Amino acid sequence: MTIEKNHPLCTRAPHAPWREILRQRWSGRRDRALVLVAVNGAHHVLSSGGPGTGTVDDVPAPSLFGGYDSAFHVDLAERPAAQPVALATPYGTEPVDVRLLWWAHDPAQVVRTRTTDGWDAVRRDLSRRLYDLADNCEADGQALSASAMLQCLAAPNVLDGTGLTYRVTDVQARDTEGELRLGRAATSEAPFAWTADRREEYQFCLRTVRDGPVSLAALWLLRHPDQVSQVLDWSVRHQNLIRQETTWQDEVAGLLGKLSDEERQELSELLRDRLHALGRRVPEQRDTWTYDGGLDGAADGRTL
């Protein structure tokens, strides 16, 4: 919710009622009304000849010696405000600002309700009307749009309970958060990233997800090149996740590395005979001689 900073809507007059009557008549101000409260509770409005000047509750017009108990100043100027809204569309939520003007049309009612800041009452009524408008659009099978809000709420909306009036002046796109969420997200249509004009991006994302953590980490690094050290730290801590899937050949190679010398020798001879049978050229095997005892190093045996 956003609202322009303004002075209070209703304030108690600092001087005696008779002095306030003179000041109001001599000032000629049309943006402020003087509300006089009689001892019997009747409210009189004096606003320098502007709208609302005269009597309230069928009581006589205010007079200099009317015996008033208190006096109040009510601001009559229009006040700008904005209500953030998120519109549900087939392509996701569209954030907008509903801009409006609000003002006091009944100064006496403002004083009766002791409304010093009327935006809260205006905001509640605007929210109710927006929710009702969204429900009506949904019942008609249509989505609530910015143009529909502007068309339905551009006329003055009167709040008799507080003496305030407001009207919507514009609906603008917005990038911030904290808005009302109106309407129901579309369920029959595919998400925005899956529509035909975004199919290439969808296929890329699909391949990246299927390739697993390695591709996702690389994609993250591409979007955030300043986080190289964080990605490397994550990779070291999660080797079990980023290790690529092994093939049958990788598993056999790992198994051969765990065999004993005697087992490797036996498999080597079997492989040599098989390659000979296939007509493949096999490297010659070098004989290894071992010597034992004797100053002359007499041969004791021969091992292949």
Image (tube, rainbow, N blue to C red):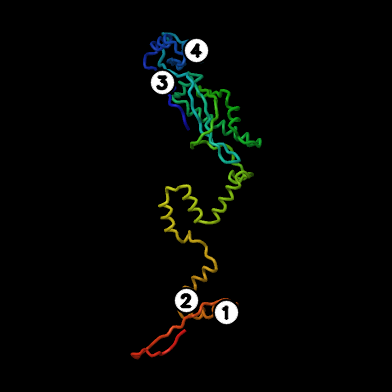
Mark 1 in CB contact with mark 3 (< 8 angstroms):
no
Kindly state the secondary structure of the residue where label 3 is placed: strand
- Which residue is situated farthest in the front direction here? 296
Ranked by sequence position, the earlier of labels 2 and 1 is 2
Ranked by sequence position, the earlier of labels 3 and 4 is 3
Q: What is the crowding at mark 4: few (fewer than 14 residues within 10 Å), some, or many (at least 20)? A: some
Q: Residue 7 shows which numbered tag?
A: none
Badge 4 amino acid: Gly
Q: Nearest to the eye among marks 4 and 2: give it.
A: 2
Q: What is the crowding at mark 3: few (fewer than 14 residues within 10 Å), some, or many (at least 20)? A: some
* Residue in the picture at 48% in, 78% down: 264
The residue identified by callout 3 is 11
Mark 3 in CB contact with mark 4 (< 8 angstroms):
no
* Residue in the picture at 50% in, 61% down: 244
Badge 3 amino acid: Thr
Q: In the rendered image, which quarter is residue 181 located in?
A: top right
Mark 4 in CB contact with mark 2 (< 8 angstroms):
no
Q: Residue 259 shows which numbered tag?
A: 2
Kindly state the secondary structure of the residue where label 4 is placed: loop
The residue identified by callout 4 is 50
* Residue in the picture at 52% in, 65% down: 246
Distance (Cα) linking label 2 and label 1: 24 Å
Ranked by sequence position, the earlier of labels 4 and 2 is 4
Indicate the position of residue 137 as horizontal and vertical percent values.
Answer: 63, 34
Q: Nearest to the eye among marks 4 and 1: give it.
A: 1
Looking at the image, residue 25 lies above or below residue 112: above
Looking at the image, residue 273 lies above or below residue 69: below
Kindly state the secondary structure of the residue where label 2 is placed: loop
Distance (Cα) linking label 4 and label 1: 114 Å
Q: What is the crowding at mark 1: few (fewer than 14 residues within 10 Å), some, or many (at least 20)? A: few
